Image: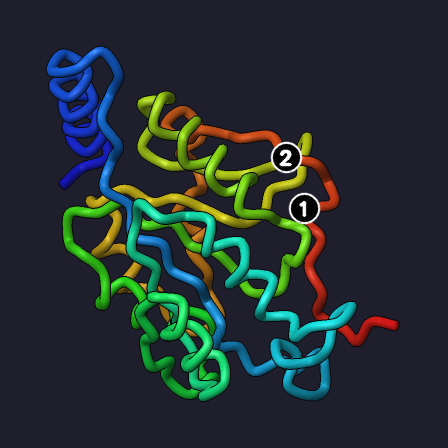
Amino acid sequence: MTLCRCVAKIFSLLWKKKNKTKEALPLKFDIILLAGGASRRFGSEKLTANFHGKPLYQYALDALSEITDHPIRVVTRNKEISEAARSRGFYPVEAPPPDEGVAASIRAGVKACRPNAFLCFFVCDQPYFTGKNLADFLYAFQKSGKAYGRVCCESRMGNPVIFPPCAHNNLLLLTGDEGGRSLLAGKENFTFFFSVPEETLRDFDTPWK
């Protein structure tokens, strides 16, 4: 499906739902938490390291626990993270070996999702990005009528990111350490940009004090 046809389909969906009720009904989202990285720059298992009193990954799970309307897939090879995700009602997805890079985890997440869902990719190393930030992003995106969604602070782009159903196949073609951002190039007119505080985009790739 071409991008133009994809956007037309999205607008058609939003229009039909809006005219059935006073407010547009929610779009169908699948949220994918990427928690399968190798932590090469960190030097050890980053996501289970203590960050101000609890493992770093728990901040992401806490944020996602505030999202109750959409299924959440957690892509990981870590047993602790997988069990913690399952205990919260999330769906663990076995991450491939991290040797290839983030694209392998992206593909695993996409394959576990519904084919007609918008995909929202979330990451495990942004502890200041809250559930309210995510809920506000999803809500504003639905009202925008755009095909893609990105969070930003002025010119700085970050995660999470939203892709439409027609982008699933392209996400499955990603290889190596190529993230989904490469698919957003040149699609600014079809992308909803959601402003967030700079602190929420802060990620941690090296050990903290």
Residue 76 percent coordinates (x, y): 43, 78
Residue tagged 2? 196
26 relative position to 195: left or right: left
- Please determine whether, in this image, residue 202 is positioned above or below residue 118: below
- Please determine whether, in this image, residue 7 is positioned above or below residue 125: above
Task: Name the residue located 58 percent from the left edge and 70 percent from the top edge.
Answer: 57
Q: Amino acid at mark 2?
A: Val
93 relative position to 61: left or right: left
Task: Name the residue located 66 percent from the left edge and 48 percent from the top edge.
Answer: 201
Task: Name the residue located 67 percent from the left edge and 46 percent from the top edge.
Answer: 200
Q: Amino acid at mark 1?
A: Thr
How many numbered callouts?
A: 2
User: Could one spot residue 151 in this view of the protein?
Assistant: yes
Q: Distance from label 1 to label 2 (Cα)?
A: 7 Å
Residue 112 percent coordinates (x, y): 23, 67
Neighbor class of circle 2 (other Cα within 10 Å; few <14, some 14-19, many 20+) is some
Q: Which colour assignment does the render follow?
A: rainbow
Residue farthest toward the front in the current orientation of the protein? 87
Report helix, strand or loop for mark 2.
loop
Report helix, strand or loop for mark 1.
helix
Mark identifier at residue 200: 1
- Please determine whether, in this image, residue 18 is positioned above or below residue 25: above
What is the quadrant of the N terminus in the image?
A: top left
Residue farthest toward the right in the current orientation of the protein? 209
Residue 160 percent coordinates (x, y): 50, 48
Task: Name the residue located 39 percent from the left edge and 44 percent from the top edge.
Answer: 162
Are the residues tagged 1 and 2 within 8 Å (C-beta)? Answer: yes
User: Could one spot residue 99 in this view of the protein?
Assistant: no
194 relative position to 5: left or right: right
